[in-house]
Image (cartoon, rainbow, N blue to C red):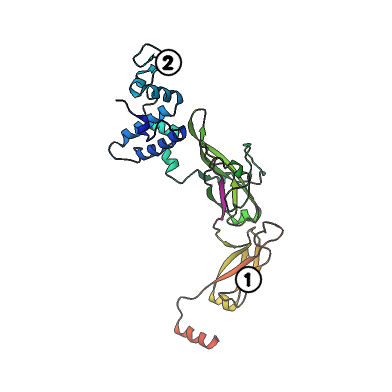
Amino acid sequence: MGKDFYKILGLTKTATLDDIKKAYKKLALKYHPDKNKSQGAEEKFKEVAEAYEVLSDPDKRKKYDTLGEDAFRQGFDPSSTGSGFGGGPGFQYTYTTNDPRTTFSQFFGGIDPFSTFFSSGQADFDSDDGINGGNIGSGNPFGMGTPFSFTNIGPRGYTKTQQTTRSRKQDPPVERNLEVSLEEVLKGNTKKMKLNRNVFDPSTGMTTREEKIMQINIKPGWKSGTKIRFEKEGDRKPDTVPADVIFIIKDKPHPLFKREGQDIVYTARISLKEALCGTTISVKNLEGKTFEVKCNNVTPSTIKRIAGQGLPNSKDTSKRGDLLIKFDIKFPENLTESVKNTLRGILP
């Protein structure tokens, strides 16, 4: 007795093409040898692949329904005459690939399905600091017809443009951090990021790896947490709207300064003697200009302020924050008894 392809997929003869696809997807993932190591799983995996190949093809399915599996394999055509099955030789059926992994890969877009279904990554990025430069321009530099915008993400995670494509499910946004130096926040810059994504070609049924350069114009004054959205630039997969690619601005650690809003903070390290008796320190701003700052009666809570030497306001770059100087006072590690007695007599 031949195989019952409907039974293998857990279906009846009234199953629709959508039912067949859903059944195959479920069973193929269940019995895939890379996931299921139990005895018989690999044979079951092959059976569901062959059943899917026959039942998903209208012509093959019609012949199979008419002849049954045994006669179907022998290549009888029910439209011809001269056979005990009401027909004669007229076509030849063999399992197309005899390789259920190929059927599986083609069904899921021509790539290793476990990299898509069993991992969270959609794409990967490499920062190309070697090709940073001045402001190259704005808008879409790729000529792909898909504009991008610098926006904050709404509560639903979709723009008005996206909501016109909701008839197809869109992949979740792909987010990556983009470190930006304080100097770049001060003056602005253009950064280029390399995006590697999977692109499905419906004409061949295969998926290839594609590299694309994403250009990001860093605006003066941008805050950490600013999001830059490139709409529908993620993986190209069958029957799926590509994910939006989102870069999130993060402050790159600076050797001298820390950021506090629009202000930048410099920590001066001075001795206890300098804190009590006074001293003058030299401080450079982000542009390299030196300021001489007199410091008297310094305590751990003392803050000196140099106005207008911080970061620009993103909405009005003519307005800048301040350069704040905080102090790290180095106390002596050891004091002789005579020094302690002297200090007792001097200090209040």
Please give the range of residues in magenta: 242-253
Q: To which residue does mark 2 refer?
A: 79
Kindly identify the amino acid type of the residue bearing the numbered disc 2. Ser
Q: To which residue does mark 1 refer?
A: 304
Query: Which of the marked residues, 1 or 2, is nearer the chain's N terminus?
Result: 2
Element type at marker 1?
strand
User: Can you say which quadrant of the picture contains the N terminus?
Assistant: top left
- Is residue 221 or residue 236 the one in the foreground? 236
Q: Which residue appears at 72% of the width and 58% of the height? A: 318
* Residue 109 visible in rendering: no
- Is residue 95 or residue 278 the one in the foreground? 95
Q: Is mark 1 in CB contact (under 8 Å) with mark 2?
A: no
Q: Which residue appears at 46% of the width and 80% of the height? A: 335
Q: Please give the label number shown on residue 78.
A: none
* Residue 335 visible in rendering: yes
Residue 28 on the magenta segment: no
Name the residue at the top extreme: 82
Residue 250 on the magenta segment: yes
User: Can you say which quadrant of the picture contains the C terminus?
Assistant: bottom right
In this rendering, the answer to whether 238 lies above or below 119 is above
Graded by Cα atoms within 10 Å as few (under 14), some (14 to 19) or many (20 or more), the crowding at tag 2 reads: few
Q: Quadrant of residue 192?
A: top right
